């Protein structure tokens, strides 16, 4: 190796280490923004929401079948879509989850959340005990493959072409709600 290249190696190694450090420090980043991307937390009142995962659900898959308990067969041209949550109550008082959620696509079409009988379902209008979380510890939803409670939507096939899909979480009272850009 030429003597002129030797000083470059430590500089390149240092540069690579700095790039890695910046990338790792961004993991777990929290923002006060009410508009976040899937995987980022958003605070609404005393509840911190984190959409951990979202995907289309296949009723012929045994895992997805458990999420879709009580749902009718999807009409032709429509597919079930699951949004998986962790919700943390950071206060000393019980807090109530919203009664509904909706998804909008890039064309501003709205899709409402469906009622669900699944043991994995997000409990709408349910209470989150003080300093507790949804899904509750040691429940099927918390111990399941995705480790989250699911909200089910019925989307037309063309919705995946009208990205981004945005989940809207209503605020409590006069509080502004939050938007989560879903990673689809």
Image: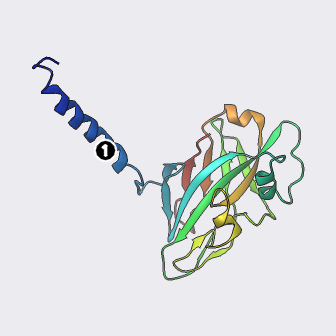
9 on left or right of 45: left
Residue 124 makes an appearance in the image = no
Q: Quadrant of residue 8?
A: top left
Q: How is the image coloured?
A: rainbow
Crowd around label 1: few <14 · some 14–19 · many ≥20 (10 Å): few
x, y percentage for residue 61?
A: 80, 48
179 on left or right of 64: left
Q: Quadrant of residue 115?
A: bottom right
Q: Nearer the viewer, residue 2 or 10?
A: 2
Q: Nearer the viewer, residue 8 or 177?
A: 8
25 on left or right of 45: left
Q: Nearer the viewer, residue 22 or 152?
A: 22
x, y percentage for residue 89?
A: 53, 73
| Numbered-mark total | 1
Residue, x 72% and y 63% (percent of image)?
120
In the rendered view, would you say 73 is above or below 50?
above
69 on left or right of 96: right
Residue, x 68% and y 31% (percent of image)?
161
Q: Quadrant of residue 135?
A: bottom right
x, y percentage for residue 153?
A: 74, 50
x, y percentage for residue 5?
A: 15, 21
Residue 158 makes an appearance in the image = yes
Helix, strand or loop for disc 1? helix
Q: Residue furthest left?
A: 3
Residue, x 88% and y 42% (percent of image)?
75
Quarter of the image for the N terminus: give it. top left
Q: Residue furthest bottom?
A: 92
Disc 1 target residue: 22
Residue, x 63% and y 41% (percent of image)?
165
């Amino acid at each position: 190796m030429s003597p002129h290249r030797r000083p470059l190696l430590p500089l390149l190694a240092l540069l690579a280490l700095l790039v890695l450090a910046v990338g790792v420090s961004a993991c777990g980043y929290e923002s006060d923004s009410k508009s976040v991307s899937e995987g980022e937390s958003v605070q609404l009142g005393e509840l911190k929401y984190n959409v951990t995962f979202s995907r289309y659900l296949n009723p012929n898959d045994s895992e997805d079948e458990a999420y879709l308990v009580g749902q009718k067969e999807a009409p032709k041209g429509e597919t079930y879509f699951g949004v998986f949550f962790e919700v943390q109550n950071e206060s000393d008082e019980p807090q109530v989850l919203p009664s509904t959620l909706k998804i909008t696509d890039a064309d501003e079409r709205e899709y409402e959340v469906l009622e669900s009988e699944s043991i994995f379902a997000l409990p709408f209008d349910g209470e989150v005990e003080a300093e507790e979380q949804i899904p509750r510890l040691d429940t099927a939803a918390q111990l399941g493959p995705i480790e989250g409670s699911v909200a089910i939507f019925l989307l037309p096939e063309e919705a995946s072409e009208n990205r981004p899909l945005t989940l809207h979480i209503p605020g409590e009272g006069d509080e502004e709600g939050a938007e989560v850009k879903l990673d689809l």
